[in-house]
Image: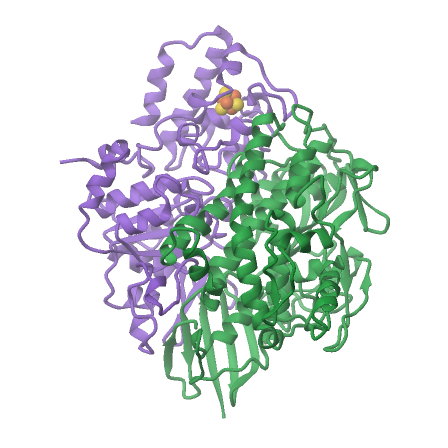
Chain colours: A purple, B green
Amino acid sequence: MLGVGTVLNLYNGEISQVLGQAAQKKHVIWLQGGSDSGCTISILQAAHPDLIDAVIDFKLAADYWTTVMTPEEDPRYDFGWWSAGYRSEDTSNVPLINAVFGNAPVDALIVEGTVQTGTPKGGAPGEYCVLAEHEGRPVTMWEAAQKLYQKAAYTVAYGQCSAFGNIPSAKGNLTGSMSLVNSLKTANVYDSKKPVISIAGCPGHPDWMLLTLASVLQGFNPDLDELGRPRAFFNQFIHDGCPRRGYYDKGEFAVNYDDPQCLWKLGCRGPITVSHCAITRWNNGVGFCTQQGPMCWGCMHPNFPDSPAGGDPTQPVPGSFFNEIEAAPSLLGINVNTAALALAGGAAIGIAAHAVRRKGGRPPPEEHDVVEVERE
Amino acid sequence: MSAKIVIDPVTRIEGHMKIELEVEGNSVKTAKNTATMYRGFENIVQGRDPRDCAPILSAICGVCHTDHHLNSVRAVENASGALQYIDGYVNDKTDLPLNAALNRNIVQAANTLYSHAAHIFVLAGPDFKLYGLLDALSKSLVVNNYADLLKRVIIPAQQFMHQTITLLGGKTPHQRGAIPGGTPVRPDIAVIARTLERFRELRKITDIAAPVIWNFVTSRALVLASLGAGTGNFLSLGMQPDPTTSSGTSKMPYVFSRGVILNSSPQKLGAIEPFDPRNITENVDKSWYDQAGTQSVFDEAPPKPDMSKSGAYTWAKSPLYKGQSCEVGPLSRVLAAGIYQKLGEVIHGIVPEVPGLPLNPMGSVFDRTVARALELVALTGSDNTTKNLEVLGTPLNLSLVDVLTALGLKTEKYNGLAEKWILSLDPGAPAYAKINVPSDGEGVGLWEAPRGSLFHWIRIKGAKTDNYQVVAPTTWNVHPDGPLEKALVGTPIDKDAKDPALGNMYLRKVAWVVRSFDLCLACTVHAIDANGSEAVLEFP
Ligand code: SF4
């Protein structure tokens, strides 16, 4: 019996064997809440596997996926994006409505974007984001997300918004915007035995998403960390695999943003941000931020864009991305009272270890133990 | 007797969308579009370091994912004096290194190309049965069905462009290749070669697909030109500033010039006039915000959401230029630059029945579609010398290369605009120059995203963002009483109509009109008839 971690790690030919065993179509609903569609665009960039292989090999039936569904009658145009009978004049066949209120099967729910739980003046709770109209009333993202989470066998929060709240939930927002998990908790429907799987990142990496989706649709329970991220893709700091690491270890730091050295002093978040960016890289592996030039902005960090920006999250105005992280006085206090405690603690200790490393020139052996704190 | 059709959800660019049509007889009598999501970015950036606005505002749109980032950087550079709008907003002057100016042009080209390709193939394509591409391509590639077409043509085409943006910006969507002062990506030989290679790969695809699409669309020119007449006002903030003239970065003329066309009539396109940002205002009378009336975009206090306002039906505000509602997008760009009119003269010289371009001076499905395809080819270039282009089914005896050459977009030195910028990159030379962001000041970003004009404005106080204003392309096109609502009025709706090549025509013409604005609109349709009973229809 394979665990999903194993499946994900096996991906290299063998996974397709496992996946080839998929017998039945799997029904997927893709919801977009407070999103910018960037994750939908990102999934089109999937390379290993690409989206078409995923749909065919994994037998996905994307019953509702607004941006990419094809509305054609010609069978040459139909390859499984839509199996529900949209062409009928029967309301019960509207794929979204039928999934939320009707009997349509939902194997997996994918959520892109935040869930807005606030109440606009003159509106109803959640009415900052309305997905559709049903029986003459608006269906909010918040309502649809609750109903579908309870119905779906698996729920994946794809992208930073649904995983951690991201920019739409940042300080200053007026809409009660939050991550999927927090919105489910607010509505008292979250079941800790049915965790939301989080593919963090702005956008979420498409290859990680499709592999995770493939795994859960075949019935494997992913090996997740405390924040719901599959460990297969979130088990080291970006800094650990950065091509500029040699400069860091020598203590050579970029002065200008287009210099080739380590970008730490200019604000790089690689040392506190966990993901496989440096391994998978982006867009069919052509590169990633610190390889091409930009520093890591921490777009996968649970508190992006607020506290990883070197500021005190309790203050009204977060610090700048352009501040060196160590220069932020409150860094070690990030999020002490929040759910991200484990990670922030690990990150903070990681930073301390970095400080030690830079002074000593060589990495102290304990550092690896410290990194384990984050993993466990 | 009138009936009501509600299309909800409509997939959107920024904000979920609903369209309500009142139908009388066999055509649309009134149209109302509603943006059904509010996120409030202008509130989120307040109080932050001005340089931090770019990565935050980038998340306004994940489709035009490079442009909000880039234009926010430009607003900060303008506040710093490093970017100046000179000659009455006609040209730009920048203190940035040449490599930085070129990087931004290439990234803008790549983003525009991917977006146009996605629109032409994935979003609008199915409405036109993919322009007969399946048949055309099955002869040259292994393409038997839509899945093959996606896998071998459409997905690779847009991936090449995303890979290019990653090479020049770190990752994409949401590249990080622009910061105030330039770009952190210093181009080396490998990056230049890999970027060039990807544009040339895309060209192989567009060289095959573009003539097929062109001939399909121009064979239906008369029908498509009669659909979707907009406001007849066109606005472009300028695309592809050229840093390679003898003036270098101290005076960059725009290839797609910045300009405004107002007061066109169905017979005659209005005159091109220079743009001035002080003429932009915003009206919120029909929008869910607590203010009323029209005010300048500068120093507007960010409005508070309020759905209780009577008469309001959308989160979109109404941006206006000299009090008028303007269309933005590829058609506005090629019109403001005069490129489209020039193409019309070339065609008129060969096929006298074609009076010139635009076919409809108020804008139309035809003109928007052709303008988008023209930009696609202008940016990518072409190696296709087969004289296979037609208009109204009449051979033009012109190839894609002939068209580009006639428009001055292909010369001996370069092939298409993207290639021009890539070949001008200086390997290893700086791409960033330190600039000082003032602790007090204001700046404007004028830029074109694939779907049209993008306006950013920042006020900085005490080194913090004090006020910020964004006017996004879709807002220009979909606001109350705006171009899309106008364009829908009069659109034929015939439940029983069939087309021999296209099949069921019921809502197809509505779909053509809506999608001609590139709103990323997809499938499901709710229809509510006059008795209030609900029906569901595919779209179309
Ligand atoms: S600090 Fe940033 S640039 Fe430097 S080695 Fe770490 S991840 Fe790379």
Report whether B190 appears left or right of A184. Answer: right
- The picture places residue B263, in percent across and down from the top left corner, at 77, 72
**Is residue B400 something that shows in the picture?**
yes
Who's the residue at 48% across and 68% down the image? B128
Extreme residue toward the bottom, this view: B1
- The picture places residue B392, in percent across and down from the top left corner, at 61, 72
Q: Is residue A27 above or below residue A161?
A: below
Q: Is residue A221 above or below residue A175?
A: above
Who's the residue at 70% across and 37% down the image? B101
Quadrant occupied by the C terminus of chain B: bottom left
Extreme residue toward the left, this view: A1
- The picture places residue A232, in percent across and down from the top left corner, at 30, 32
Counting the numbered discs, the total is 0
Report whether A130 appears left or right of A58. Answer: right
- The picture places residue A363, in percent across and down from the top left corner, at 42, 10
- Give the image quarter of residue A1: top left
Report whether A353 appears left or right of B270. Answer: left
Report whether B444 appears left or right of B59. Answer: right
Q: Is residue A207 above or below residue B123?
A: above
**Is residue B290 something that shows in the picture?**
no
Q: Looking at the image, which is closer to me, B420 or A116?
A: B420
- Give the image quarter of residue B315: bottom right
Q: Looking at the image, which is closer to me, B382 or B258?
A: B382
Q: Is residue A108 above or below residue B314?
A: above
